[in-house]
Image (spheres, rainbow, N blue to C red):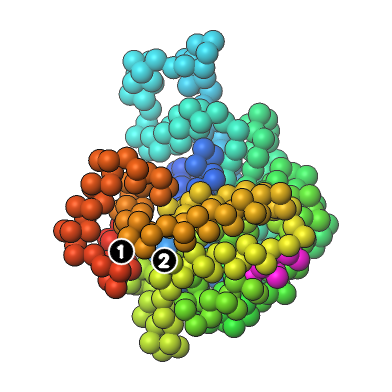
Amino acid sequence: MIEGLKSGCGTKMARINPPYQGFEQGPIRPPSEARSLLIRITRNCPWNRCTFCSIYKQEKFSIRPVEDVKKDIETVSRHLQRIMELSDSTGAVYRRDLGRLAGDIDQNEIEAFNAALNWFVCGMKSIFLQDANSLVIKTDYLVEILSFLKEKFPQVDRITSYARSHSLARISDEDLIRIKEAGLNRIHVGLETGSDTLLKLIQKGSSKEMHIVAGQKVKNAGMELSEYIMPGLGGSSLSKEHALETADALNQIDPHFIRLRTLIIPPETQLFNDETEYQFKKSTDIQVVEEIRLLIENLNGITSTFKSDHIANLLQMIEGTFPDEKTKMLKIIEDFFALPLETQIQFQVGRRFGFLLHPDNLKTEHLKARVESICQQFLITPENVDEVIDRTIQRTM
């Protein structure tokens, strides 16, 4: 099969596709899509140059044939129907019945069956299109896939996808409206920063102006917009510029959601290996919180919901909707800085070791004792706490 495609950067490609290999799922999805059915439209990332990202670096980008995507959808739909036939009036399915059903399934379809079962358990309300940029494919192809999804799963409330600002800025307003009317109603964009200096350094392939144009186009098309920003990306030297320029971009976009993804630098990334080349000095956890405070202080005239919904964020409780809850979010930060230094460090350790969510957790005796034990074991001091935590995070990642 030879399929002519036009990528988001305007280049035409003729791709010889291998025979259908069965149901596929990509490696990631946003935390907010944890309950979504994952449908893979493209493999990996068409840009794949961002210096902070290691997810797709050893992989080649490809676009799956529309017919293969539709076969995936059809397979999930078939398994979902069988699961629903076994459910009682409350929606429950007995384990013994599922065991018999799973035992009858061809081994080549186990992954599709598991996807259907997980989605059934999660309520079957949302779908996420993988991988890194579904908007890179032709509008006609995307509309065909979306229409098929709505045909097979008419109960779905939300269909979402990642997209690059570069791709969105190049799609016509008319085509974005077609895509929205076909069913795509939320887009996740990695803005990362509004600083053109940083955007060039990290090889994002977008400018601040392009981010703004793309975000406004998505909103004008009637779709929800989640913009992801990366506290800590500017290091200690560009932290202020990062916060202020990002706030300015977000003020002009006014996305529905602003989501924090604190910078983590895996050793295999170009950013990690180029640290000395452009004098990137990683911010401490405390400096990142200060940067987030500066960002929030300068977010004005928007109605966005601010979310800290990622394990990489130190203060996950910083959440709220502008403008009404801006003061509340800033108070959370001020309350953290009002804690004694020892308590800040203890929370930092407990949070990064994965068992504290809020500084108030330290009021629980056994949790506080556990933190103190870790501090003693690793000889943690105010001077080395970030170094120890960095090593911990690298092992976790």
Number of residue marks: 2
Q: Quadrant of the N terminus?
A: bottom right
Q: Quadrant of the C terminus?
A: bottom left
Label 1 SS: helix
Q: Is residue 387 left or right of residue 180?
A: left
First reached walking from the N terminus: tag 2 or tag 1: 2
Residue 314 screen position, x and y as percent? 43, 57
Q: Nearer the viewer, residue 77 or 300?
A: 300
What residue span does the magenta drawing correspond to?
Answer: 246-253
Give yes or no for residue 35 being in the magenta stretch.
no
Give the residue number, with chain letter if any, for mark 1: 389
| Furthest residue toward left | 377
Is the Cβ of the residue at disc 2 closer than 8 Å to that at disc 1? yes
Check the image and report above or below for 235 versus 130: below
Residue 151 screen position, x and y as percent? 68, 33
Check the image and report above or below for 92 versus 130: above
**Residue located at (19% from left, 52% from top):** 373
Q: Is residue 351 left or right of residue 336?
A: left
> Within 10 angstroms of label 2, few (less than 14), some, or many (20 or more) residues?
many
Does residue 191 appear in the picture of this structure?
no
Disc assigned to residue 285: 2
**Residue located at (51% from left, 49% from top):** 317
Which of the 4 quarters of the picture holds residue 193? bottom right
Q: Nearer the viewer, residue 321 or 192?
A: 321
**Residue located at (54% from left, 39% from top):** 36
Q: Nearer the viewer, residue 341 or 249?
A: 341
Label 2 SS: helix
Q: Which amino acid type is marked by label 2?
A: Asp
Disc assigned to residue 260: none
Does residue 97 appear in the picture of this structure?
yes
